[in-house]
Image (cartoon, rainbow, N blue to C red):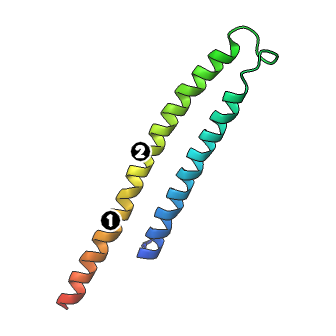
Amino acid sequence: MYSMDYTMLEELYNELTSLVNKMISNIDWAREIINKMDNKEHWKGNGYDNYKEKFKALATNFEAYCNDVYKLNNNIKTSIERIKSVDADVMSSI
């Protein structure tokens, strides 16, 4: 059987937080690039506006997804604190 200790749980929490931060940073970076692409020499007709609207919808959904991951990741942090508290109570009663 595989078990996790506090350090492993905290590393998991930190790694997930770091990954989500990077994902949000990357979507912001992509948004900046797309906003700079409004160039009539590059886009003909309504191509840019259509592309930008599709990306906006994707980015909005992506940010909502990242917020959900943050919430779930906070459950790991809360679990760590609860487990530590239970362990402390058990150890003090021994």
Toward the bottom, the furthest residue is 94
Question: Does residue 62 appear left or right of residue 48 in this picture?
Answer: left
Badge 1 crowding class, 10 Å Cα cut-off, few under 14, some 14 to 19, many 20 or more, is some
Query: Does residue 5 appear in the picture of this structure?
Result: no
Residue drawn where x is 71% and y is 29% of the image:
36
- CB of mark 1 within 8 Å of CB of mark 2? no
Instruction: Check disc 2 and give the amino acid type.
Output: Asp
Earlier-in-chain disc, 1 versus 2: 2
Q: Is residue 42 above or below residue 80?
A: above
Could you say where residue 1 lies in the image, as x and y percent from the top left? 42, 72
Residue drawn where x is 53% and y is 61% of the image:
15
Badge 2 crowding class, 10 Å Cα cut-off, few under 14, some 14 to 19, many 20 or more, is few
Residue drawn where x is 44% and y is 68% of the image:
9
Could you say where residue 32 lies in the image, as x and y percent from the top left? 66, 35
Q: Which mark is residue 68?
A: 2
- In front of the other: 69 or 29: 29
Could you say where residue 63 lies in the image, as x and y percent from the top left? 49, 39
Q: Is residue 28 above or below residue 74?
A: above
- Helix or strand or loop: what does disc 2 sit on? helix
Q: Is residue 46 above or below residue 58?
A: above
Quarter holding the C terminus?
A: bottom left
- Helix or strand or loop: what does disc 1 sit on? helix
Instruction: Check disc 1 and give the amino acid type.
Output: Ser
Toward the right, the furthest residue is 41
Q: Which mark is residue 79?
A: 1
Query: Does residue 75 appear in the picture of this structure?
Result: yes
| Residue 85 occupies quadrant | bottom left
Q: CA distance from mark 1 to mark 2?
A: 17 Å
Could you say where residue 18 lies in the image, as x and y percent from the top left? 55, 58
